[in-house]
Image (cartoon, helix red, strand yellow):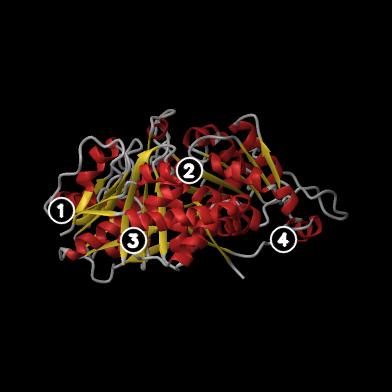
Amino acid sequence: MTQEIIIAGFGGQGVLSMGKIMAYSGVMQDMEVSWMPSYGPEMRGGTANVTVILSDERISSPILQIFDTAIILNQQSMDKFESKVKPGGTLIYDSNGITHFPTRKDINIFHIPAAKEAGRMGNIKTFNMIILGGFLKIFPIMKMENVIKGLKKSLPERHHKLVPMNQDAINRGMEIVETVQTL
Amino acid sequence: MGELRLMKGNEAIAEGFIRAGVDAYYGYPITPQSEVMEYLMAEKPEERTGMVVLQAESELAAINMVYGAACTGKKIVTSSSSPGISLMQESFSYIAGSEVPAVVLNVVRGGPGLGDIQPAQSDYFQSTKGGGHGDYRQIVLAPSSVQEMYDFVNLAFDLAFKYRIMVLILSDGAIGQMMEKVMLDEQKPRLTNQEIKDRFDSWALTGRTPGREHNIITSLDLDQENLERHNFHLQKKYKEIEENEVILEEVSLEDAEYVFMAYGTSARICHKALQIARKEGIKVGLLRPITLWPFPEKKVKELASKVKGFLSVEMSAGQMIEDIRLAVEGKTKVAHFGRYGGVIHSPEEVVAALKSKIIGG
């Protein structure tokens, strides 16, 4: 199993930290992982993205142009990455702020209304964990216990009290993910 | 027992400095390697091992602190990125001339000039041919994973002290910035002053030792006959390193008709390109030099009489390709492919280049 994932959105949405939690969860599950962020001026311009690879085998290139799965969290990222999903791959998005919806017919598409749900739950910061929950529902490649371990490893000790709230958000994400189209 | 962590390359090497029992790090911040000093400062190594971490006022100051401190036989390191490394070249030559062991990390970014802060491999000439003056060499190690960033610290110091030479760890912005899992080993204790005296008293500035002539460390010798003898000695040492210290990795070379030759991040990309090409039935292998100097000349020579061509894949306009050509001696086709200036080629682009420049070219 190899999952080559791009997570793309605005800086501040927790794109990089979600990728890190995903990668650390993979480590806890004894997988090979890589986490390659965009860094530098493009980040400061507002968009942030990270390539996460989870695999049972040694990872070759940490830098990719096409992906098994794209997790898209703003319009700019939709414009940039919809075409970069492999045929038969998966696109996951939150419609918040999206004006042009995905149009490809040769990929699986899922929608997670995470921003709306995070607002409803009263903590917008759980947004990225709702997305992670949705991803894990679609791809149950990591056990929840390992995700929680990964979460703990990613957070400084003083923030461990936030783990239950994040776990709730992951569970909520699993419940609210909507299928738009499957092949 | 080891400890498994998810770390950036820059963090892993910084942790590696501490655990290798390094005595001092002197540096000056520059993207994309600023996490090295940032991590060291946050870890407070002076409390963990007594290691000194000091932000110098410039790269010039940092490398000259390294030169001075390394004269005492202690384990000394600095890190920077391309423009900062250029500033240090004069001292690299002095360190080579006076035969001081030291380790330097270059997390390469796009050039020339200030360039940008994205990953590149355009410092190969400077690293392997010498950016400073004089007939000198330095060992160049090219890690291609976060684990190797960590592991090569010990390797670099072993080589640096074995040959009293500077070892450059040539990384790039991608390996510095990405996170992978790293197995950390046990903390090595720093050597005591007595241990340093016991091991390096023949050359190092360890204080006065009764009965021994005083040690002088200098790169200056105004007697040309003496200086030529010193150069003979250096060349003999370099020859010995070329004979004994080549490290490389081979992937699927047994039945290869074509060879990707690449190091660092580019080697990772070529590994993927190799998998794509093999699925299409193209018999391509990967030769990854881990030491860029000494260059794996013998291995290239051996392959040159067997394969139909080499594609040198570098994030540069083509630098390592010159060493490949020298070793191949016209026996087979050699071409370059690579994006540069901070742009990174994709595995698909590499496969397309293999087809157009080597197979069909």
Label 1 sits on residue: B355
Query: Whole-Å distance between the Cαs marked 3 and 2?
Result: 21 Å
Quadrant of the drawing holding the N terminus of chain B = bottom right
Using the image, name the chain to which the residue with label 1 belongs.
Answer: B
Indicate the position of residue B151 as horizontal and vertical percent values. 54, 60
What's the amino acid at mark 3? Lys
Label 3 sits on residue: A137
Indicate the position of residue A106 as horizontal and vertical percent values. 14, 54
Indicate the position of residue B34 as horizontal and vertical percent values. 54, 39
Tags 3 and 2 touching, CB below 8 Å: no
Eye-nearest disc, 3 or 2 = 2
Element under disc 3: helix
Query: Which residue is at the front of the view, B163 or B65?
Result: B65
What's the amino acid at mark 4? Pro
Q: Can you say whether A82 is above or below A182 in the image?
A: above
Q: Which mark, residue A123?
A: 2
Q: Can you say whether A167 is above or below B100 in the image?
A: below
Query: Whole-Å distance between the Cαs marked 2 and 1?
Result: 53 Å
Q: Are marks 2 and 1 on the same chain?
A: no
Label 4 sits on residue: B189
Query: Whole-Å distance between the Cαs marked 4 and 2?
Result: 47 Å
Tags 3 and 4 touching, CB below 8 Å: no
Element under disc 4: loop
Eye-nearest disc, 3 or 4 = 3
